[in-house]
Amino acid sequence: MRWFGKEKPKEAWEEAVPSPLGDIEAAERIRNICRSVADSAAVVAACAEDGRKSAQKKFELESERYQCAARAAMELAMKVSDELMRDAAVREIVELCLKAGDLKTAKILFRAIQSPAIRDPVLRDFPALQP
């Protein structure tokens, strides 16, 4: 929406990435992306159950926002070289997917978590991820 000549602010995942990011900066950026789109993920989960047309329009907008953010976070996570940092970042994305009701993607991403220190608490918190 453009009021008074102001442009729509950029989303966290749309901002320009400075030259090569270190693992800590990439993990922090993933965390920021996941937190900034958490409200859209909750709306996606709620609107999926509602069949009204107005809810359908909102679902489409919020779903697109969630999917763009999740895709950007996944791309960043693939670039993290430290295994523990990558697992922590993937956990953030898994929680985002579960908040949106996207169990299929969450299960796929959960299998990428290698560290038992991160994997076990996730399983404890979200038993639906059991293989």
Image (cartoon, rainbow, N blue to C red):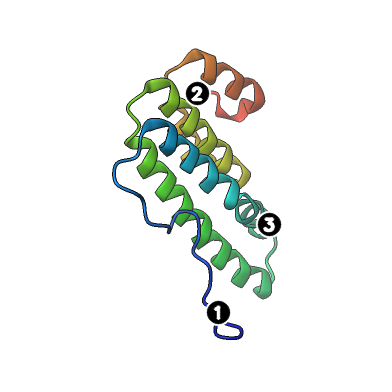
Label 3 neighbourhood size at 10 Å, few (<14), some (14-19), many (20+)?
Answer: few
Q: Position of residue 66 (x, y in %)?
A: 52, 55
* Farthest residue, direction left: 19
The structure residue drawn at horizontal position 69% and vertical position 55%, both measured from the top left corner, is 46
Q: Nearer the viewer, residue 125 or 5?
A: 5
The structure residue drawn at horizontal position 34% and vertical position 39%, both measured from the top left corner, is 21
* Depicted 60 relative to depicted 20: above or below: below
Residue 49, numbered circle: 3
Q: Nearer the viewer, residue 100 or 79?
A: 79
Question: Residue at label 1?
Answer: 6
Q: Choose mark 1 or mark 2, whichever is in front.
A: 1
1 and 3 marks in contact (CB < 8 Å): no
Q: Amino acid at mark 2?
A: Pro
3 or 2: tag closer to the N-terminus = 3
Question: Residue at label 2?
Answer: 131
The structure residue drawn at horizontal position 43% and vertical position 31%, both measured from the top left corner, is 24
1 or 2: tag closer to the N-terminus = 1
Q: Amino acid at mark 3?
A: Glu
State how far apart marks 1 and 3 are (Cα): 35 Å
* Depicted 115 relative to depicted 4: above or below: above
Q: Nearer the viewer, residue 63 or 72?
A: 72
3 and 2 marks in contact (CB < 8 Å): no
Q: Is residue 128 left or right of residue 70?
A: right
Q: Position of residue 55 (x, y in %)?
A: 67, 69
Q: Position of residue 65 (x, y in %)?
A: 51, 60
Q: Choose mark 1 or mark 3, whichever is in front.
A: 1
Say if residue 102 shows up in the picture: no
Q: Position of residue 23 (x, y in %)?
A: 38, 31
